[in-house]
Image (cartoon, rainbow, N blue to C red):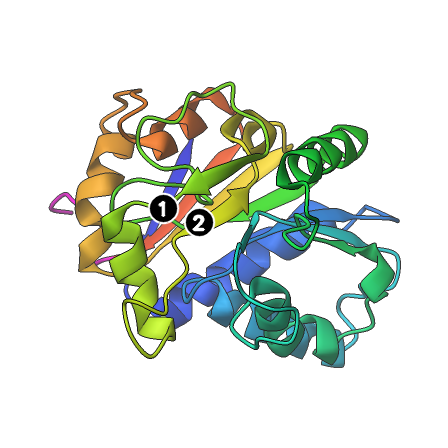
Amino acid sequence: MRVKVVNNYEILSKEAESVFLEAIKLKEKPIFGLATGSTPIGLYKNLVNSFNEGKISFKDAKTFNLDEYIGLSKEDTRNYKSFMNENLFSKVDIDLKNTFFPDVYNKDLKQSCLSYSKLLSNYKRDIQILGLGENGHIAFNEPGTEFNSKTHIVKLTESTIKANSRFFKSLEETPSSAITMGIEEILNAHLILLLVAGEKKKEALKILLDGKITIECPASALLNNPNLIIICDKEAYPYKE
């Protein structure tokens, strides 16, 4: 585990870009695991700039997103596919046929989970981007999720729904369930890059940095991947420097 503490979100996003570019610089057909939420937006903005400067191409890349809400329509701009299109895909040279999400529109959601797991087993991600939930969740793996979990349907906790409600008009409108990549599948990435910003993430980050592995903090499972890099800002860092 490598931990880098930076002064602010802008520097965090720049450092994340550097790690990302280094991880895939020798890959002819890179495979990315991508996350949504507010934390990786700065990284994606920097990657778009790098693309415009000719430093990176997504032409031969494949991407796998961590999760998708259940209950939003395909046209709803708040679903995670729309998020990725807005913040990255529409601004680079990626083939949308090579961008993958859990299929929440299939009538058989359990089959969707099995299909996504099979797909993930065929493609080892070179780098997996992650954010950290206030309650220690990674992707939508809430506290209590077994570390050997694979893609599954999840009922979101009250704290996660409340945190996500900032993207919706009301708490009632906020989705309460999703399909998420499982913890075992997240850990199968070659390199994991965890981005943590803001004081609200301090408690969850402390559990991880203290080295206590517990299913009550799903992020602590990341300690089982030897190639874990954590970049956090000073507000999220739980110790005095």
Give the camera-side residue of 240 and 166. Answer: 166
> Circle 1 — which element?
loop
Residue 236 shows up from this direction: no
Tell me the tag on residue 156: 1
Q: Could you say whether the residue bearing mark 2 is in a helix, strand or loop?
A: strand
Which residue is rendered at x = 86% and y = 48% of the image? 29
Tell whether position 237 is magenta: yes
Q: How far across and how far down the image is residue 8, in percent?
A: 30, 68
Q: The magenta stretch spans which residues? A: 234-241
Q: Which mark is drawn over residue 177?
A: 2
Q: Nearer the viewer, residue 216 or 205?
A: 216
Q: Is residue 74 above or below residue 190?
A: below
Circle 2: residue type: Ser
Q: Amino acid at mark 1?
A: Leu
In which quadrant is the N terminus drawn? top left
In the rendered image, residue 7, in percent from the top left (x then y), is placed at: 28, 64
For this orientation, the residue located farthest to the front is 107
Q: Is residue 66 within the magenta segment? A: no
> In the rendered picture of this protein, how many numbered marks are placed on residues?
2
Main secondary structure found in the magenta portion: loop
CB-based contact (under 8 Å), mark 2 and mark 1:
yes
The residue that appears at 41% across and 67% down in the rendered structure is: 38
Q: Is residue 228 visible?
A: yes
Residue drawn at (48%, 62%), measured in percent from left and top? 40
Per the model, the C-alpha gap separating discs 2 and 1 is 5 Å
Q: Quadrant of residue 89?
A: bottom right
